[in-house]
Amino acid sequence: MTPVVIESAAAMRLYIDERRRAEPECQVGFVPTMGALHRGHARLIEQARKACRTVVVSIFVNPLQFDRPDDLDRYPRTLETDLDLCAGLGVDTVFAPSAAEMYPRPPACVVDVHRLADHLCGRFRPGHFGGMATVVLKLFQIVRPDQAYFGEKDAQQLAIIRRLVADLNVPVEIVPVPTVRDEDGLALSSRNRRLSPEEREQATSLYRALGEARRQILAGARDPGEVRRHATAVIPAHAGIKLEYLAIVDPEELQPVEQVAGPVLVAGALWVGSTRLIDNLLCSPPP
Ligand code: AMP
């Protein structure tokens, strides 16, 4: 069944009001995306479909969270095939607003993300997480879901959204979904479609580096510097590849650890040509 496509915030609110009036027990599941949907997004939608009577997917490439104009311009936009995928997964409604609909005038009030954005991607993408948190809060206000689904692939985003709803008392349950990968380990991403066949090959080195870090931690390594040294050695020295960061942080506050004494998040960002890819693994040292 083709989902209803809604472009205005007012119509989206009305749709949810009507759904809830018609069926007061109806659970609304929400999957916010930037489109160019793939199997990773599909996993989120499937989980929402299993748990909720009404499933809303938003497709919005949010200008506020792009720190580089060229990245915003080049971000893939594939609405027609996205709608086909949503239809196949039984999505009820796709909310696909324009930038003018979401930001009729430059916002004067935005979400400010403190400590949690200091490291990992936040260090290299100024304003990104504030822009992301602002649009997610706006979307929550419009859709008012019972549950919202987020991928663990974007671990810093997920940690920040969890704090957003806790700190600002947003009445929504955040449901994490494990990262969906290709067979060789590469995390699925809308940005992967920009990779040439050679770059696609090189891109797997990020997952392999994270895997090496995990191997070190499981083998008892405690010194983050030592773990990083082994992990970064996996990234091939090639002109087109540049490791932006590989960091070992605590999974909630996202601050670098001095020693691996409990579960840690090992996260990295890798430039492959002009494409920036991110990935992470949660690692627990042996007791
Ligand atoms: P995006 O469209 O990239 O903003 O992603 C929308 C949602 O899909 C976010 O919650 C992402 O974390 C999630 N997502 C993207 N790629 C994957 C993946 N490979 N596995 C699981 N979730 C993903």
Image (cartoon, grey):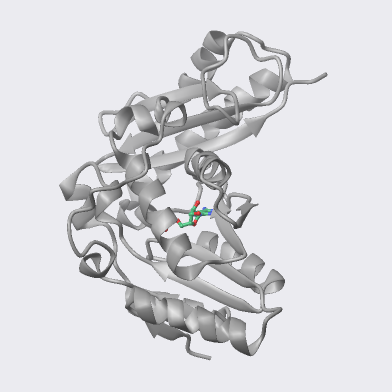
Answer with the quarter of the image where residue 123 lies: top left
Quadrant (top left/top right/bottom left/bottom right) for the C terminus: top right
Say how many tags the image has: 0
Residue 5, given in percent of the width and then of the height, sits at: 39, 83
Q: Is residue 244 left or right of residue 165?
A: left
Residues 21 and 82: in front is 21
Residue drawn 51% across and 73% down? 56
Q: State the residue at coordinates (65%, 18%).
A: 216
Asked if residue 122 can be seen in this view, the reply is: yes
The residue positioned 60% from the left and 86% from the top of the image is: 21
Residue drawn at 60 percent across, 72 percent down:
28
Q: Looking at the rendering, which quadrant does residue 111 occupy?
A: top left
In front: 112, or 95?
A: 112
Q: Quadrant of residue 59?
A: bottom left
State left or right for residue 238 relative to residue 70.
right
| Residue 53, image x, y percentages | 66, 79
From this viewpoint, which residue is outermost toward the right?
Answer: 287
Eyeballing the image, is 152 above or below 118? Answer: below
Q: Is residue 273 above or below residue 83?
A: above
Residue 181 seen in render: no
Q: Does residue 179 appear to the left or right of 78 in the view shown? A: right
- Asked if 217 appears above or below 87 in the picture, the reply is above
Along the line of sight, the residue nearer the viewer: 77 or 52: 52
Q: Position of residue 52 (x, y in %)?
A: 67, 73
Residue 43: where, in percent of width, then height?
60, 63
